[in-house]
Amino acid sequence: MTGFKTFLCAALGAVAAAFAAQAQTLPDLGGREVVVVTENAYPPLQFVDPKTGEQIGWEYDAMNELGSRLNFKPVYQNTSWDAMIQAVSDGQYDIGMTGITIRDDRKEKVDFSDAYMRSEMFMLVRGDETRFTDPAGFKALEGGLIGAQPGTTPFYVAVYDVLDGNEANEQIKLFETFGATVQALRAGDVDLVLTDGTAGMGYVEASGGALKLVGQALGTEDFGFIFPKGSDLVAPINAGIAALKADGTLDTLNKKWFLDYKMGQ
């Protein structure tokens, strides 16, 4: 038994030393303020707690942890999705975060971090929906409407994977926020909302049976933080993301926000 304890202590010491060495190699940003903009409309990644009014979520926790490890102070501001990418591109903010899918067309305006999360797109419908369970079934639904935000990944998936590739298709009803699309779905104003599985499960859990996910995944998407082109923050943030992956912090956040946290409780 003594030998096992000695081995265990040595192993734990080696792991601790490895993490300490990794921490020492992370960049030090000298306590600078970094202005981070978000939409606060994409639970459980980032949203306003309905009970406390506090800004919370997976991305807030991840960014605060990055700030601690890289020695910077996140200063949070809010803007709409429509304005975010251009505003970051113009240098109004240092970082943008709101579950932003890494896309080549967006890279023309902003720089992306490495991916911090991979998700799959699913169909979010009302809990009593029986008319369709896949894109083919929706296409056969006369007068069916999809709620989406313009310029987002769900919008493009709706256009090209569910409908006919026409971005002006009248079956797409546009909204300013993702939360508004979900409210329209619940109210019966639209019949379908496309969402990544992680955020979708958050809404399903909070709905008390009013919403559900149906069908197979329509594709995968990688989320990244965005920066003005040429930002000196990209490399440090990437180093921080790698550290959070390596020591299991991202897995802990996934469990906290996608499994343990219950909206509205």
Image (spheres, rainbow, N blue to C red):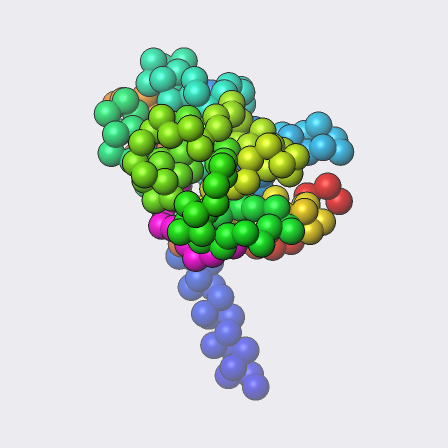
Q: Nearer the viewer, residue 20 or 162?
A: 162
- The percent position of residue 60, horizontal first and vertical second, equals 54, 35
- At 48% from the left and 41% from the top, the residue drawn is 142
- The percent position of residue 105, horizontal first and vertical second, equals 25, 29
- At 54% from the left and 78% from the top, the residue drawn is 5
The quarter of the picture where residue 241 lies is top left
Q: How many marks?
A: 0
Image quadrant where one finds the N terminus: bottom right
Q: Is residue 36 visible?
A: no
Image quadrant where one finds the C terminus: top right
Magenta stretch containing residue 221, yes or no?
Answer: yes
- The percent position of residue 107, horizontal first and vertical second, equals 26, 29
Q: Which residues are magenta?
A: 213-223
- The percent position of residue 157, horizontal first and vertical second, equals 37, 40
Relative side of 210 to 154, left or right: right
Q: Nearer the viewer, residue 74 or 196?
A: 196
- At 50% from the left and 83% from the top, the residue drawn is 3
Q: Is residue 131 visible?
A: yes
Magenta stretch containing residue 138, yes or no?
Answer: no
The residue sitting at the front extreme is 142
Looking at the image, is 186 positioned above or below residue 109? below
- At 40% from the left and 34% from the top, the residue drawn is 155
Looking at the image, is 253 positioned above or below residue 9? above
Looking at the image, is 133 positioned above or below residue 234? below
